Amino acid sequence: MGSHGHVHPLTDSRLQPSGIVKVSIAVLVLVGLAALVFGFGSDSTRTWGSLLFNFFFFYSIAVIGLSFAGMQEIVRARWGRPVKRLHEMFGSFVMVASFFFLILLGCLYTGFGSADHMYKWMMDPHMLDHFAGKRDWLVKDFLVYRDVFAVVCIAFGAWWQLRCVVSRDQKYLDGASDAKEYALKTRDHLRYWSAPVLVLYACCFSLLGFDLLMSLEPLWFSTLWGGWLFALAMQTMLASLSLWMFWLKSTEIGKQYKTQQFHDIGKLLYGFSIFFAYLTYAHILTYWYGNVPEETEYFFHRLNQPWLTIAIVTPLFNFVLPLFGLIPKASKYTPVYTPIVCCCIILAQWFVMMLVVMPDVVDSHNQMYFPWIEIGVGLGVLGLFLASIFYFGTKYPVVAAGDPDLRMYEAAH
């Protein structure tokens, strides 16, 4: 991040990324493209799986970032107004990921690039003959149509939400005579419509999770899947938000972020770390005492190498570390320490998402397996995620200048 000029809290606050940032993002994208080229040349099914779980991972952060903003609009929360634009910026990646999902769904529909080989039931529809509900639901054409609809709905919701907040800021920065009236009107508009938009996000996001992730193992099912994915994404989004705040802390923009905001985000991160662990435990406990072969096989498969190591290590970093490491008050806003905890959480959840997808995509039972394709594709998607955030930040203010609740918050403090 390059240097910034003086930025008043309620004036222009666009990002000015340095050359190092731009080059780093370009390198990440190029690494991802190289991984795709080699991946499709060696194992196209594994490469599609790598694309699926990486895009879904960052897409989850983007959708939950917008959802978190919508929640604050509904309850008129003021504590998070200085940092609200940061997790709204995550939502700019929704458009990029939506483009990928539409391509993926098109390839599933046509069979292009062997994308449909990821899904066993697409290759052998008769495996569902004895499961009436699954047989009727997991139909390729039906899945493509409904998932295209879900992707478009989320993209439209993200576009509407971001358009409302940035247009309000632009009027304020342009000095329009009706800026105050427009800001108040937009606030009421967002408060009224954010609730149905959140329902839209919840339904469509859960549907995509069911269809694109859970159906990779068609004989297994989870009624808690949507909630579990939400908990995973919320914890990861909060860790990413904390990192983003520390990144900007030394700039003029970052002077808007007080210790209280870091502490509040840290408390939420701590709470959702426990919530994610609780849902994971409840998940596994239910299958354990049910002991139905079609259900337990999903977990047994992941308790063999090379997946066993990931299954053992990830709880240490996405639960044990934040459980004990974020208890002290200072641990939620201490430079160096807090970012390290956040990085551990994000990396652990990335591996959790890989554990969801890749065991059903690759055949590596008790074989040597190094995820070089997954890491390469992940770095590329990370580059696209950062590129979308910085592009948004250079085009629109990072401080929500036109937000009347931000001015009320600052007046109270």
Image: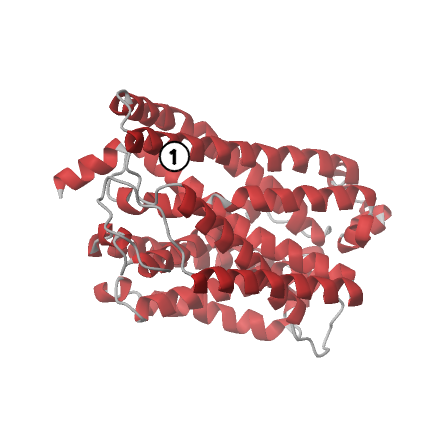
Quarter occupied by the N terminus? bottom left
Residue 162 position in % (x across, y down): 43, 35
Residue ranking furthest to the left = 412
Q: Is residue 124 above or below residue 379?
A: above
- Density class for disc 1 (Cα within 10 Å; few <14, some 14-19, many ≥20) is many
Q: Nearer the viewer, residue 388 or 242?
A: 388
**Foreground residue, 261 or 162?**
162
Q: Residue at x 40, y 60 (%)?
A: 18
Residue 243 horizontal side relative to residue 26, left or right: left
Which residue is at the front of the view, 32 or 282? 32
Q: Is residue 60 left or right of residue 70?
A: right
Q: Is residue 401 left or right of residue 352?
A: left
Q: Which residue is mark 1?
A: 166
Q: Quarter holding the C terminus?
A: top left
SS at badge 1: helix
Q: Residue at x 31, y 47 (%)?
A: 83
In-image side of 116 versus 168 (left or right)? right
Q: Quadrant of residue 204?
A: top right
Could you tell me residue 270's position as x and y percent?
34, 58
Residue depicted at 32% across the width and 28% down the height: 171
Residue 223 appearing in the image: no
